[in-house]
């Protein structure tokens, strides 16, 4: 698992690694029937990384909290397609990279650069790369969630990163992130719920029962969100929550 963490960190934190001639992704050599395309052994870990990227992104980074809150915001606004999924996912990815940048810089300096220079083996680099990520995850993980997966193992000290196994930390971190995301999402959606209730009550009192309340509440919710500079507040709150 630490090796997968190392590969994820390299993919996120190391710019233009794919263009490095020392790690070719594919090798093209002339053969009897034409060109032969092979996979060098040095590039095999990179190719094996890609199927695991979505799961690792969810398990080891801030992406889950940010994405859940953004999609709950859209649900609260009552607009199922605006902003579109691509925009929200792109914003969540950019914010994730920004939040994770201290850990990625530490991984790049302590693990990736020594690994490229040949002064550090893959296993040792994976150990060093896992430490900053585990420290970040521990700061965001509740003690009760960690205890659920460690079964209160006395050998595990939450204050010492090296004693916490990734196999237990990853699900505990993800559980804590979901709870935090729903707490933030509740605070984001609550004002929109009040607007929906007020609009529905007023329209019922006026006898406008045939008109969907969403037609009236959506412009009011958008007006409120723009007036309070909602995107600035939400993004700032999300970054500050880490």
Image (tube, rainbow, N blue to C red):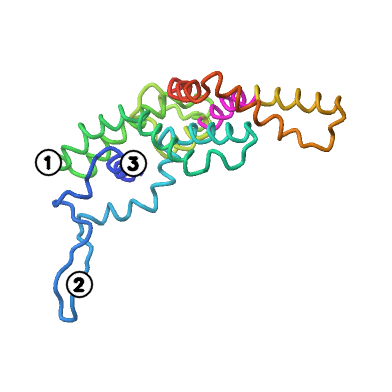
- Report how many numbered discs are placed on residues in the image: 3
What residue is drawn where x is 14% and y is 73%? Answer: 30
Q: Position of residue 7 (x, y in %)?
A: 30, 45
Taking the magenta stretch, the answer to whether it contains residue 187 is: yes
Q: Quadrant of the C terminus?
A: top left
Magenta region, mostly helix, strand or loop? helix
Which segment did they paint magenta? 177-190
Q: Position of residue 33 (x, y in %)?
A: 19, 81
SS for tag 2? strand
Would you call the spot at circle 2 few (<14 residues within 10 Å), some (14-19), or many (20 or more)?
few
Would you call the spot at circle 3 few (<14 residues within 10 Å), some (14-19), or many (20 or more)?
many
Taking the magenta stretch, the answer to whether it contains residue 171 is: no
Mark 3–mark 1 contact, CB under 8 Å? no
Mark carried by residue 5: 3
In the figure, 227 relative to 219: above or below?
A: above
Of residue 122 and residue 20, the one placed in the foreground of this image is 20
Residue 150 visible in the displayed image: no
Q: CA distance from mark 3 to mark 1?
A: 20 Å
Q: Quadrant of the N terminus?
A: top left
Which of labels 2 and 3 is toward the front?
2
| Residue receiving disc 1 | 117
| Residue receiving disc 2 | 36
Of residue 126 and residue 196, the one placed in the foreground of this image is 196
Of residue 241 and residue 157, the one placed in the foreground of this image is 241
What residue is drawn where x is 44% and y is 20%? Answer: 240
SS for tag 1? helix
């Amino acid at each position: 698992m630490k090796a997968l963490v190392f590969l994820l960190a390299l993919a996120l934190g190391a710019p233009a690694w794919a263009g490095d001639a020392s790690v070719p992704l594919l090798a093209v050599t002339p053969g009897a029937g034409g060109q032969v395309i092979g996979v060098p052994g040095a590039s095999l870990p990179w190719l094996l990384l890609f199927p695991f990227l979505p799961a690792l992104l969810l398990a080891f980074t801030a992406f889950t909290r940010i994405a859940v809150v953004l999609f709950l915001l859209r649900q609260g606004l009552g607009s199922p397609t605006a902003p579109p999924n691509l925009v929200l996912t792109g914003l969540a990815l950019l914010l994730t990279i920004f939040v994770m940048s201290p850990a990625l810089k530490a991984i790049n300096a302590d693990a990736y650069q020594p690994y490229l220079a040949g002064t550090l083996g893959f296993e040792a680099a994976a150990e060093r790369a896992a430490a900053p990520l585990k420290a970040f995850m521990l700061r965001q993980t509740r003690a009760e969630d960690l205890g659920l997966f460690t079964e209160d193992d006395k050998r595990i000290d939450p204050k010492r990163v090296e004693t916490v196994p990734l196999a237990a930390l990853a699900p505990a971190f993800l559980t804590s992130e979901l709870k935090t995301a729903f707490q933030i999402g509740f605070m984001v959606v609550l004002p929109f719920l009040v607007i929906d209730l007020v609009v529905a009550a007023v329209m019922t009192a006026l006898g406008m029962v045939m008109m969907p309340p969403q037609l009236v509440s959506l412009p009011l919710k958008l007006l409120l969100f723009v007036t309070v500079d909602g995107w600035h507040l939400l993004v700032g709150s999300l970054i500050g929550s880490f």
